[in-house]
Image (cartoon, rainbow, N blue to C red):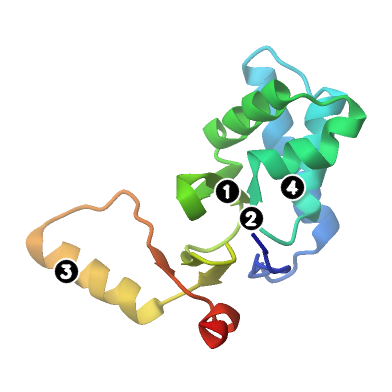
Amino acid sequence: MRTCAKELVYFRQRNSDRKSYTERIYRLFTGYLAGHGLRLTGQRRLILDYFLKADRHLSREDIYTALRRHGIGRATVFRTLKMMEKCKLVDHVVGMAGKPRFEVNIERPHHDHLICINCGRIQEVRWPKLEAIQEETCRKIGFTPNWHHHEIFGWCRDCSRKK
């Protein structure tokens, strides 16, 4: 399986830089951990740093493979990802073969995903017109949405050309 680089699209906030963004992420995670009687260990810090440097959606195996040389085991990766999801720091997308791939989801506007079933690339997209249709439909029928996501599976441009 080949994955394309630079999948993640960061829709930068005005007056925001990478350093202050990283600091806010660390405050959120350390606050969550402290609230549960835990601390930011060296291993958790490495996992978080790896996420913050990523330019694509990461699987559990991606993280484990990249960080095992630092003494981080699969169980640590799995537990840390679970904590990061519970504090709403990361979210997952169902990738190829139903395996979750994760992205940092703080201060990023709502977006959906196009997932290539050949190479595994996940492309982020925003559809303001579709969002407006969904909001209008919900309003008309008196439905109060809490959350939603769209994942469309198919072939990316590169893989479509090769078919």
Residue at image mark 1: 101
**Which numbered disc flags the more N-terminal residue, 4 or 2?**
4
Kind of residue at disc 3: Thr
Disc 1 secondary structure class: strand
As measured in the structure, the alpha-carbon distance from the residue carrying label 3 to the one carrying label 4 is 36 Å
Residue 155 x %, y %: 48, 75
Mark earlier in primary sequence (1, 2)? 2
Q: Which residue is mark 4?
A: 51
The mark that comes first in sequence, 3 or 1, is: 1
> Disc 3 vs disc 2: Cβ atoms closer than 8 Å?
no
Residue tagged by mark 2?
Answer: 57
- Kind of residue at badge 4: Phe
| Disc 1 from disc 4: Cα separation | 11 Å
Could you tell me if residue 37 is visible in this image? yes
> Disc 3 versus disc 2: distance between alpha carbons?
31 Å
Whether label 1 touches label 2, CB < 8 Å:
yes
Q: CA distance from mark 1 to mark 2?
A: 5 Å
For discs 1 and 4, the disc positioned in front in the rendered view = 1
Which image quadrant is residue 120 in?
bottom right
